[in-house]
Image: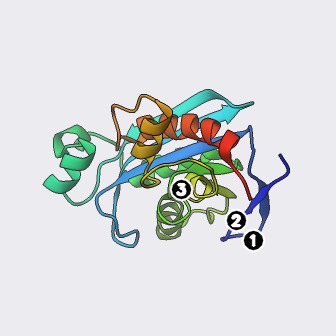
Amino acid sequence: MSTSIINTNTRKSIKADISDYTVIDLETTDVNVRICEIIEASAVRVRNNVITDRFSTLIKPVKPISSLITSITGITNDMVKDAPSVQQVLPDYLDFIGDDIILGHNVACFDRNIIKIHCEKLGLPPFMNDTLDTLTYSRKCDIDVPNRKLTTLTQYFGISHDDAHRALADCIANHECYQKLKKYFHE
């Protein structure tokens, strides 16, 4: 497939049918990218359309996790009390991702921006990886679904996703959805 998606952040054109990439997902304390803290960071490396490696860790936030976030993610304050800080985790996370194209659901507006902001705060090099956002991608696919949420797409394709809103489970489900969506993509 020669179709491409323009990465709105870098204006680079990337192929819509890619086989090597890293899926990323973050769980956070808020939906506001400017004030949220990362409480879980996961990634799966994909080579030739197959998951070849995984990265996943809980992260201890500065402020307590609210009951609302716990109800969504299942991540409790007790679970993160001995977890490493974002300062300890982010360099290893970025090293795992490397120069790969990142793939994720709503990654262009959410996860990518959170990583960029945290890199700035921590004095790390800018996060500039090209991005394929499966939320945008799914809107260019001929499928009949009521919305484009990851949970809706996994249900549509019959993909197991029992642990939704946990970063590693979301990465794996997102990879599987992308593999299915490729058949339905059109300009």
Q: Which disc number belongs to residue 7?
A: 2
| Residue for point 44% across, 40% down | 170
Q: Residue at x 66, y 63 (%)?
A: 128
The residue lying toward the viewer, choosing from 133 and 83, is: 133
The residue beneath circle 3 is 135
Residue 94 x %, y %: 58, 49
Type of the residue with mark 1? Arg
Which amino acid lies under the numbered mark 3 shown in the image of this protein?
Leu
- Total number of numbered labels? 3
Few, some or many residues within 10 Å of mark 2 (<14, 14–19, 20+): some
Q: Are marks 2 and 1 in contact (CB under 8 Å)?
A: yes
Quarter of the rendering occupied by the C terminus? bottom right
Residue at 68 percent across and 42 percent down: it is 182
Residue at the limit of the structure toward the front, as seen here: 144
Label 3, residues with CA under 10 Å away: few <14, some 14-19, many ≥20: many
Marked residue nearer the N-terminal end (3 or 1): 1
Left or right: 74 with respect to 148?
left
Among the two numbered marks 3 and 2 on one chain, the one whose residue lies closer to the N terminus? 2
Q: Secondary structure at mark 3?
A: helix
Q: How is the image coloured?
A: rainbow
Mark number displayed over residue 11: 1
Residue 130 left/right relative to 172: right
Picture layout, residue 116 above or below residue 148: below
Would residue 124 appear left or right of 166 to someone viewing this image?
right
| Nearest to the observer: residue 158 or residue 114 | 158
Of marks 3 and 1, the one in the foreground: 3
Q: Amino acid at mark 2?
A: Asn
Mark 2 secondary-structure assignment? loop
